[in-house]
Image (cartoon, rainbow, N blue to C red):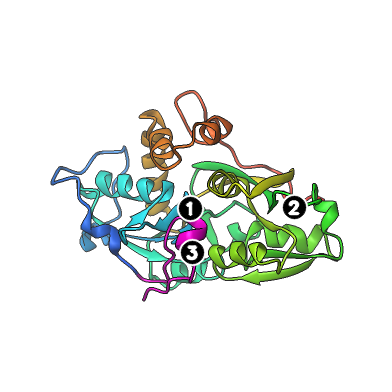
């Protein structure tokens, strides 16, 4: 099922989509042989002949539907690379659109094999899913109109701010700016559009997403000191040691090949944004680690 959000093409320069689209399967790099990453692909996944991956579909530059109706984004490129390792072709992947609220239930009910959907590591989330080694680093900032007087999270006291349900930004605001009046949406595009129509004084979300939006929308700017900084991990079902081992081995191979940076450059073409985040992906000589303390410190 696909559901496009009205006006998103003009606002985000992409088209949004709902759940359950395997659109990425139309693109193939050609037949090839599976790649030995140093760990065996679990037999149940091997038997299906494709990876079933939960991804964001309205979250540029990480996962979205492009103007041609195809899955696109940094995390989409990662999923296709994993499919190439597993089955020899980048097309051996079925994408299912997920949100912050439903991505874990989709995994635990076996609708997908793997989550690659902007999921920050938190100790609470780690109780229900097993996290891979990190593949991106991010924190929370604010997107506001260019002429806004908002400069920090403290300025949100008593004011409406748009968020997405289940996001790290929403959790942090709930704990640390308790008087902020969150206007929450399931879709990133809806939260962004609501801020632009003055339903919130700011849009709180991951800093990389906001930097990309600001680069494409000159009437907005990113403000605020980064909060709740934590790397993102892929999610596998709790206790699925075989899948976790294979995913971690594949991530390490991608890091050694500098595939994460290649994917980031392909999907984020603004050189200024690239410079800001070139150390936020695993690269040869640069590994990411999860924090050991509470990322929701105020």
Answer with left or right where residue 216 lies relative to residue 27: right
**First of labels 3, 1 by sequence position:** 3
In this view, the residue in front, 118 or 37, is 118
Determine the secondary structure under disc 1: loop
* Labels 3 and 1 touching (C-beta < 8 A): no
Label disc, if present, on residue 8 of the rendered structure: 3
The quadrant in which residue 39 appears is top left
- Magenta span covers which residues? 1-20
Q: Residue at x 49, y 67 (%)?
A: 7
**First of labels 3, 2 by sequence position:** 3
* Labels 3 and 2 touching (C-beta < 8 A): no
CA separation in Å, label 3 and label 2: 31 Å
Label disc, if present, on residue 136 of the rendered structure: none
Determine the secondary structure under disc 2: loop
**First of labels 2, 1 by sequence position:** 1
Q: What residue did someone put label 1 on?
A: 60
User: Relative to 275, does residue 226 appear above or below in the rendering?
Assistant: below
User: Relative to 207, does residue 156 appear above or below in the rendering?
Assistant: below
Residue 226, horizontal then vertical, whole percent? 72, 43
Specify whether residue 61 is painted magenta: no
Residue 180, horizontal then vertical, whole percent? 81, 64
**Label total for image:** 3
The mark closer to the camera, 2 or 1, is 1
The secondary structure that dominates the magenta segment is: loop
């Amino acid at each position: 099922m696909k559901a496009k959000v009205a006006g998103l093409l003009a606002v985000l320069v992409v088209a949004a989509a709902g759940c359950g689209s395997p659109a990425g399967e139309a693109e193939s790099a050609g037949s090839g042989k599976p790649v030995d990453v140093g760990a065996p692909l679990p037999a149940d996944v091997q038997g299906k002949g494709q990876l079933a991956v939960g991804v964001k579909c309205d979250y540029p530059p990480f996962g979205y539907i492009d103007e041609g109706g195809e899955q696109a984004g940094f995390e989409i490129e990662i999923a296709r690379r994993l499919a190439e390792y597993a089955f020899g072709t980048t097309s051996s992947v079925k994408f299912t659109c997920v949100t912050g609220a439903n991505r874990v239930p989709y995994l635990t009910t076996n609708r997908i094999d793997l989550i690659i959907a902007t999921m920050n590591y938190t100790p609470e989330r780690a109780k229900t899913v097993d996290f891979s080694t990190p593949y991106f680093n991010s924190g929370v900032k604010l997107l506001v109109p260019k002429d806004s007087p908002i400069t920090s999270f403290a300025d949100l006291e008593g004011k409406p701010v748009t968020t997405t349900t289940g996001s790290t930004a929403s959790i942090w605001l709930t704990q640390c700016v308790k008087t902020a009046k969150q206007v929450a949406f399931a879709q990133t595009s809806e939260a962004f559009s609501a801020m632009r129509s003055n339903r919130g004084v700011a849009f709180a979300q991951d800093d990389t997403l906001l930097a990309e939006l600001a680069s494409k929308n000159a009437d907005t700017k990113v403000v605020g000191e980064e909060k709740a900084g934590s790397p993102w991990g892929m999610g596998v079902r709790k206790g699925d040691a075989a899948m976790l081992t294979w995913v971690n081995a594949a991530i390490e191979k991608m890091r050694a090949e500098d595939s994460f940076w290649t994917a980031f450059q392909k999907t984020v073409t603004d050189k200024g944004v690239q410079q800001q985040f070139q150390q936020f992906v695993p690269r040869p000589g640069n590994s990411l680690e999860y924090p050991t303390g509470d990322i929701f410190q105020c």
